[in-house]
Image (tube, rainbow, N blue to C red):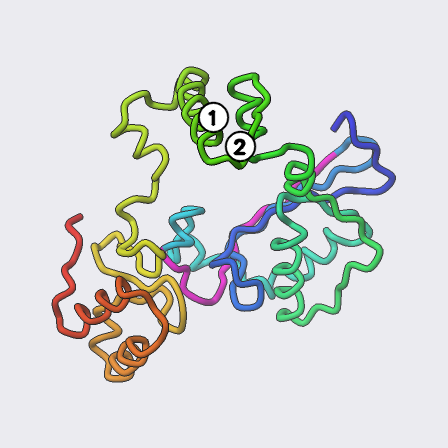
Amino acid sequence: MQNLKLTRPLVVFDLETTGINVEKDRIVQIAMIKVDPDGSRNTFETLVNPEQPIPPEATAVHGIKDVDVRDKPTFSQIRREVEDYLADVDLAGFNSVNFDLPLLQAELARAGSEMDFPGVRHLDAMKIFHRMERRDLTAAYKLYCGKDLTGAHNALADTEATLEILDAQIERYDEVPDEVDALHGFCNPDEGKYLDRKRKFLWSDEGEAVFTFGKFQGKSLNAVVADQRGRSYLEWMLGKDFSEEIKGILRDALDGALPKKEV
């Protein structure tokens, strides 16, 4: 680290988790790099047994499966080591202010830790990125086309600028396809993974429709339907404010008409 001036150790950390609910989800991997003011550094990294199933949609993001963490330590078992590593340091991460640190604090509390972070300075590279680099249409037009966008938020001006940006992006990046089918796949990498537009149901590796939310998160629709309590839950959902697309999937499941996806 050549540019950041440190007065005490800085720990840069990242978590992979079972999901994005800070209170309910669990850590499946933790990595930390401690940088001392003299430039020396050391690393702590381990997979963690979350003591609950890892949902398929989480595995799709980080690639960690239940079998990978089955014999790994729980967070309670590494708690002391984590506390020692984080003692008297400052922190840094990417989206760590809003997500990683709150979830880490929740895990520490669940493990019986009284560790808090009063007075700790916290650097978040994502917040710096968002503050320093505009990501709107005007900024994209300047970056890719080298022009200032006049008439921004006029529909025709924005449409013309978007057309120029798209063409300039294809020219700029070798990895961006110049054929529509391939470019559609590039822009929609998750297409075909979900049954519905709201991504409430995911296709599993076995071709089963799987919940991505709620009390049956990670369970297949067919397995839920096979249980009377599960059927009652799906019938309850039909009376709630879900889209007609979702309700159609639920009706098919209840009628035994929900097909499996070919794998």
- Image spot of residue 182 (x, y percent): 28, 28
- Residue 46 sits inside the magenta stretch: yes
Question: What kind of element bears circle 2?
Answer: helix
Contact between labelled residues 1 and 2, with CB atoms less than 8 Å apart? yes
Residue 11 falls left or right of residue 171: right
Label 2 – label 1 distance at C-alpha? 8 Å
At which x and y percent is residue 81?
68, 56
Tell me residue 175's x, y (percent): 39, 22
Q: Amino acid at mark 1?
A: Ala
Query: Which of the numbered marks, if any, corresponds to residue 61?
Result: none
Q: Residue 231 vs residue 72: left or right?
A: left
Q: Which residue is mark 1?
A: 161
The residue nearer to you, when weighing 163 against 14, is 163
Residue that sits furthest to the right in the current view? 7
Mark 1, other Cα within 10 Å: few <14 / some 14–19 / many ≥20: many
Local crowd size for mark 2, using a 10 Å CA cut-off: few (<14), some (14–19), many (≥20): some
The residue wearing badge 2 is 137
Magenta span covers which residues? Answer: 41-56
